[in-house]
Amino acid sequence: MNFLAHLHLADNSKTSLAANLAGDFAKGNIDNFPKHLQQGIWMHRQIDQLTDSHELTKELVGLFPKNLTRAAPIIVDLAFDHMLAKYWDEYHHLTLQQFAENAYDAIDVCEHLPEKLKLLAPKIRGENWLTAYKSKKGLHQTINSVAKRLSKPEIFQGAIQAVDKLDIEIEIAFRTFYPQLMAYSKVWARKTPSEYL
């Protein structure tokens, strides 16, 4: 899952939006981070672990061409965010723009965020990243943007064509898997290890 899904799942589980997003930028032992970020980082890691190991996502990743083997899990994360944004009204009572504003505000006021997220936050809001996923064009731009940030962008060669070709398979996998993830996120919020609360 990428930024939008992690923020939505944080909201769904009534845990910190900023802390859950911080999980993408928090490396190493959770104990090294401020207490108010620890549950969110732990939740983020549970979500990523289940997503990466789930049979549905593994099957979907396996449908990508061989040259995209390394990039496919990242592409699936981005494509799932696109599906969430595309069908947002089915998953949340606020509009996507209202939710995005709330998320940007939560990130802005959260103290001691990982340095990379702190530096990226103005760009995330300025370019309204969370709503950009909604259109196919936005998904394509996001894939290109992620590829450019990598040390080996060539692993994304043909990613846009592949994601377009697998559109139906991605939607089926997302619609089947995401409600499970929503349910799991609520369970994890209740079962967070006490040292992270």
Image (cartoon, grey):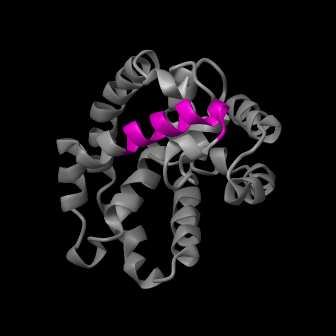
| x then y, percent, for residue 32 | 58, 46
Q: Can see residue 23?
A: yes
Question: Which residue is rendered at x = 50% and y = 26% of the image?
Answer: 195
Residue 45 within the segment the image draws in magenta: yes
Q: Is residue 155 above or below residue 85?
A: below
Q: Can see residue 85?
A: no
| x then y, percent, for residue 17 | 63, 32
Q: In screen coordinates, is 44 left or right of 98?
A: left
Dominant secondary structure of the residues highlighted in magenta in the image: helix
Q: Is residue 69 above or below residue 24?
A: below
Q: Is residue 47 above or below residue 146?
A: above
Question: Which residue is rendered at x = 51% and y = 74% of the image?
Answer: 147
Q: Which residues are magenta?
A: 34-48
Residue 169 within the segment the image draws in magenta: no
Question: Which residue is rendered at x = 40% and y = 23% of the image?
Answer: 188
| x then y, percent, for residue 103 | 70, 35
Q: Nearer the viewer, residue 10 or 88?
A: 10
| x then y, percent, for residue 9 | 50, 29
Question: Which residue is rendered at x = 68% and y = 30% of the image?
Answer: 99
Picture quarter with the C terminus = top right
